[in-house]
Amino acid sequence: MAKKKTASENGERQLTAGKPAGGLGLSGGKAVNWTLNVIKSMGPWLISQSDKASEAHARNAARLGAVAAGKELMLQEVKLYSDHQAALLEKFRAAKPAARIQIQRDLEEADRRLRHLHVVTQALNYRKEPQMENSSAHPGPKKTQALEASEAHWMDKFNELARAHNEPWRAELLARALAAEASAPGSVPPRLVWFIGTMEEMIFDAFSALIDLSFSIRTSRVVVAHKRFAEIWTTTHARDISLGKLLFVLAETGLIANDATYRFGKGEVYITTYGNLKYSLKCHESMKLKESVFLTEMGDTLASFADPKATPIGAEMFEAWIKSLPESKCTVSKVQEA
């Protein structure tokens, strides 16, 4: 009988199948590496697959592409564990009471593995297309013992949380965190992973509502003039809440920095957007954006996992800020999308 290989070993082999002698192209190579980084989060404990299945999947990898092949591999593992659970249940029904204790433990472990698999499979939906640039100009960090230990620590925390019972919104955030970390190791701090796994739904709802009210200036997200609009009510996923209360709920989370200052440089041009509204600001003098709420580094990272939805209140706040900008210090032009 042919020696079986673990699915994790098969995954690396399958996802690199079809690689030409000259190596994969830039986007293909990055897709392979990213997909492998996601799948390897499952560790070496996946149920074995036969060589025949591996070869068939290798052909699919060449045909479908790395990410699609990775999804197919993970779905195969979900089916294998589901079948394993069904077999354990049959065994449980026929077992004597003493034997049922171990079978129950096996069933619980299989259930944890399935929850883990579902999160990792979901992560494969969130890969961002790489920028077409010379990858040699941006080499990744050199592998060191300290870096490998840090990556192992991150993965331990993620795996612990992914195996738990998670609400759909929490499972999605964990999946997005894994996808981001697979793209750029070290970009998602372990503290944020732990925060995702332990935050209350009220905090999630409040932060989501805040992101829906925020607009972007270059790479920053901002909620302006929040004191002026403190009594304006907005809607979270659960209930209506004033902006003032929203900020109070988030005050101790480490996600926001109240009353921070944003400096606009003289002679600089800034693009700012909210939903479909887009303006260009050309500064004649330096000026500061005060009485605004900015996100901390952890908040910015968490916000990058969200899909903000523009609201009428957010648009009103954004337009009010645009109108308040002094003409003597900057020229404001509305940008029309092509």
Image (cartoon, grey):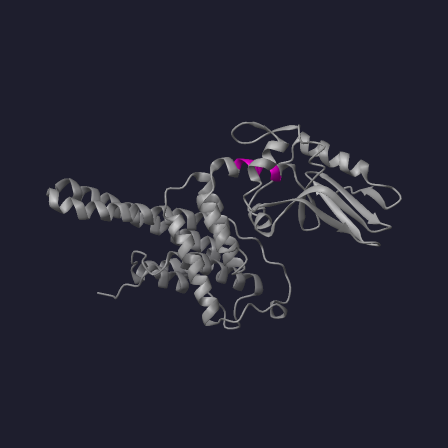
Q: Nearer the viewer, residue 283 or 291?
A: 291
Q: Residue furthest right?
A: 328
The N terminus - image quarter: bottom left
Compared to 308, does 312 lie above or below? Answer: above
Q: Count every numbered label the image shows and give the total.
A: 0
Q: Nearer the viewer, residue 127 or 279?
A: 279
Locate residue 136: give its quadrant.
Answer: bottom right
Locate residue 86: give its quadrant.
Answer: top left
Q: Is residue 185 magenta?
A: no
324 left or right, relative to 197: right
Q: Is residue 209 visible?
A: no
The C terminus - image quarter: top right
Compared to 69, does 332 lie above or below? Answer: above
310 left or right, relative to 95: right
Where does residue 283 sit, x and y in percent of width and height? 83, 49
Q: Nearer the viewer, residue 91 or 221?
A: 221
14 left or right, relative to 237: left
Compared to 326, does 67 lie above or below? Answer: below
Where does residue 332 sit, x and y in percent of width and height? 83, 43
Where does residue 323 sit, x and y in percent of width and height? 81, 36
Q: Is residue 27 visible?
A: yes
Q: Residue furthest left?
A: 96
Q: Is residue 208 magenta?
A: yes
- The residue stretch that appears in magenta: 205-211
What secondary structure characterizes most of the magenta part?
Answer: helix
Where does residue 201 sit, x and y in percent of width and height? 48, 36
Q: Residue at x 49, y 45 (%)?
A: 173
Q: Residue at x 38, y 51 (%)?
A: 160
Q: Nearer the viewer, residue 159 or 325?
A: 325
